[in-house]
Amino acid sequence: MSKSTDWLPNNREGLLSMSRDWQEVLSTTATLWNIPTTVIQEHAQLVLAAAAALETAKNETTRTPVATAQCKEAFDALTAYMRDMKRRYFLTPPLLNSDYISLGLKPHDTTPTASGTPTAQVTVETYLMGRHELGVKIIYVTGNPADPANKGYRIWYSMIAPGETPPANPDDLRKSFYTKRKKDVIEFEFGDSGKTAYFAVQIENEGKKGPWGPLVSALIP
């Protein structure tokens, strides 16, 4: 399952617990919130399927690669259905804060989060992913990773063939992409294999940019 830190629990037992809480709450509120009976029934079936698949995958006598794959598929289906339920029924009409809490969700925060100009400096570590692919991992050189000004990362890079002049500083880099992930993957063209990729990163926050990180390089596989 995904390790993302959004509103869904990041483990299967937690997801089942939330699902069962939803079933209990919706047994009395579904009509009020205009949620069709078929949706409640389909959700209940997915919960039962996920619980059974997890039990099979955890049991030493029934755990097999097929059972593990089926467990993942069952929880992926349940996760997708719960995301769709929230989007379609929990946002319109809007629920009260007490309703959100009963569902294990975070109430809406109407107070904007203050954020300023990023001041942290970051770089990337690279690692091999596949042919013509490099993974990049954000590393903080200075500053606090939890600073709300650190909204995302603009990763700049250029590919330099053997014998060509490498970039002298980050301003010489020509390509870039924006990501909010601490880890990401860059897919290069077939002809880039054997070239050296040079990278530098700036934190970005709604048009405001932090200082350049150091220039680093890696060989493109």
Image (spheres, grey):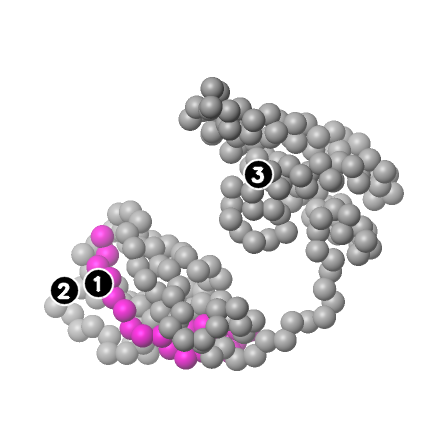
Q: What amino acid does circle 3 point to?
A: Arg
Mark 1 and mark 2 lie on one chain; the one further toward the N terminus is 2
Residue 12 location in percent, x, y? Answer: 57, 38
Which residue sits furthest top? 61
Looking at the image, do the residues carrying marks 1 and 2 touch, with CB atoms under 8 Å apart? Answer: yes
User: Is residue 36 a member of the stretch shown in magenta?
Assistant: no
Query: From what the image shows, is residue 88 above or below residue 193?
Result: above
- 1 or 3: mark nearer the eye: 3
User: At x 34% / y 55%, what residue is drawn?
Assistant: 135
Q: Any magenta on residue 205?
A: yes
Tag 3 secondary structure? helix
Closest to the observer, 184 or 21: 21
Disc 2 marks a residue whose amino acid type is Pro
Q: Which residue is mark 1?
A: 196
Q: Label 3, on which residue? A: 12
Residue 174 appears in the picture as rendered = no
97 to the left or right of 15: right
Side of 32 where 185 appears, left or right: left
| Label 1 – label 3 distance at C-alpha | 42 Å
Residue 19 occupies quadrant: top right
Q: Kindly state the secondary structure of the residue where label 1 is placed.
A: strand
Q: Secondary structure at mark 2?
A: loop
Label 2 vs label 3, nearer the camera? 3
Question: How far apart are the alpha carbons under marks 2 and 3?
Answer: 49 Å
Which disc, if any, is residue 91? Answer: none
